[in-house]
Image: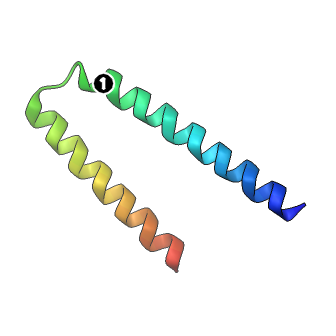
Amino acid sequence: MSENNKENKSKADEVHVSDGLAELIEAAELLTEEEIEKAAEQAKKAVEDAKNQKHH
């Protein structure tokens, strides 16, 4: 049963990522190049922070 839970969590994570990417693409159409770069830096930092928290 734990294998099934891992699989479900993975699928849920993929859905969240897909939703987030769709929102980013939609928002990017409204942003200037400078705003896009700033958002990208914030996204990179968030990913790094999440990775660091996962390891602790």
Q: Which of 4 and 52 is in front in this view?
A: 4
Residue that extends furthest to the right in the rendered view of this protein: 1
Residue under label 1, please give it: 27
Residue that extends furthest to the bottom in the rendered view of this protein: 56
Screen quadrant of the N terminus = bottom right
Residue that extends furthest to the left in the rendered view of this protein: 34
Amino acid on which the number 1 mark rests in the picture: Ala
Q: Which residue is drawn at 75% across and 48% down?
A: 8
Q: Is residue 27 left or right of residue 4?
A: left
Total count of labels: 1
Residue 12's spot in the image, x, y percent? 66, 44
Quarter of the image where one finds residue 27: top left
Residue 14's spot in the image, x, y percent? 57, 43
Q: Is mark 1 on a helix, strand or loop?
A: helix
Q: Is residue 5 left or right of residue 10?
A: right
Rate crowding at label 1 as few (under 14), some (14 to 19) or many (20 or more) other CA atoms within 10 Å: few
Residue 43's spot in the image, x, y percent? 31, 49
Q: Answer above or below: position of 15 versus 5.
A: above
Q: Answer above or below: position of 43 versus 25.
A: below
Q: Is residue 22 left or right of residue 41?
A: right
Residue 4's spot in the image, x, y percent? 83, 55
Q: How is the image coloured?
A: rainbow
Q: Residue at x 41, y 34 (%)?
A: 21
Q: Answer above or below: position of 25 versus 36.
A: above
Q: Which residue is drawn at 15% across and 42% down?
A: 37
Q: Answer above or below: position of 1 versus 37.
A: below
Q: Is residue 11 left or right of residue 8?
A: left
Q: Residue at x 74, y 58 (%)?
A: 6
Quarter of the image where one finds residue 31: top left
